[in-house]
Image (tube, rainbow, N blue to C red):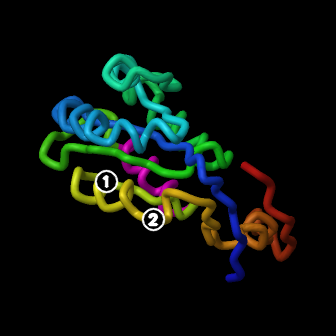
Amino acid sequence: MTTKRIPMSAEKKIALVAHDNKKRDLIEWAKYNRDLLAHHVIYATGSTGEVLERALDFPVHKLQSGPLGGDQQVGAKIVDGDIDFLIFFWDPLEPLPHDPDVKALLRLAVVWNIPTACNRASADFMISSPLMEGPYDRLVPDYEPYRRRAISLGEGPEQRPADDG
């Protein structure tokens, strides 16, 4: 499969998400990295966005709470190219009713080659990378052949091009 380059500007669009048991860790991490984060556009889900905005003293784009669709909003923004970077402190020991949403979000981050940090150590390494300071081109598979693939309708040998749904 061929690849496409998707440019990221020096000002990254970063989504910050945390499960309830990890919110304190994310807030502490964000406060510690406040000066670095201030150079980027920050998105956050639910009450995390409210707390982050107060703690960091700069605007945070607030989305819905994860279980109310916030994880899916982040995923849609990834697909639309509106999120460059995902920091998602999730709790691997806590079963969640919206676990399929979490898995879908993480899957989209991989599909679109979004840098993703799932814990404080990986977030520390990524936020301090020299690549955060300037433009960067993400390589993403060219999904156009997939979009245009023929799909059998089960009505004989005829096939038709796939639609978007």
| Residue 33 numbered mark, or none | none
Q: Position of residue 154 (x, y in %)?
A: 74, 66
Q: Main secondary structure of the magenta part?
A: helix
On screen, residue 32 versus residue 79, left or right, reads left
Residue at x 66% of width, y 49% of height: 81
Q: Residues within 10 Å of mark 2 (few under 14, many from 20)?
A: few
Check residue 108 for magenta coloring. Answer: yes
Q: How many marks?
A: 2
Q: Residues within 10 Å of mark 1 (few under 14, many from 20)?
A: many
Residue lying at the far bottom of the rendered structure: 1
The answer to which of marks 1 and 2 sits earlier in the sequence is 1
Which amino acid type corresponds to the residue marked 2 in the rendered image? Pro
Q: Position of residue 93 (x, y in %)?
A: 12, 46
Look at discs 1 and 2 and give the one toward the viewer: 2
Q: Which residue is mark 2?
A: 130
Secondary structure, mark 1, is helix
Is residue 69 positioned above or below 107 on the image? above
Which residue occupies the foreground of this view, 65 or 100?
A: 65
Secondary structure, mark 2, is helix
Check residue 127 for magenta coloring. Answer: no
Q: Which residues are magenta?
A: 100-111
Q: Position of residue 44 (x, y in %)?
A: 43, 31
Q: Quadrant location of residue 142?
A: bottom right
Q: Quadrant location of residue 17?
A: top left
Is residue 139 positioned above or below 93 on the image? below
On screen, residue 102 versus residue 1, left or right, reads left
Which amino acid type corresponds to the residue marked 1 in the rendered image? Ala
Q: Is residue 63 visible?
A: no
Residue at x 84% of width, y 70% of height: 159
Q: Which residue is mark 1?
A: 123
Q: Quadrant location of residue 117?
A: bottom left
- Give the alpha-carbon distance from disc 1 to disc 2, as whole Å: 14 Å
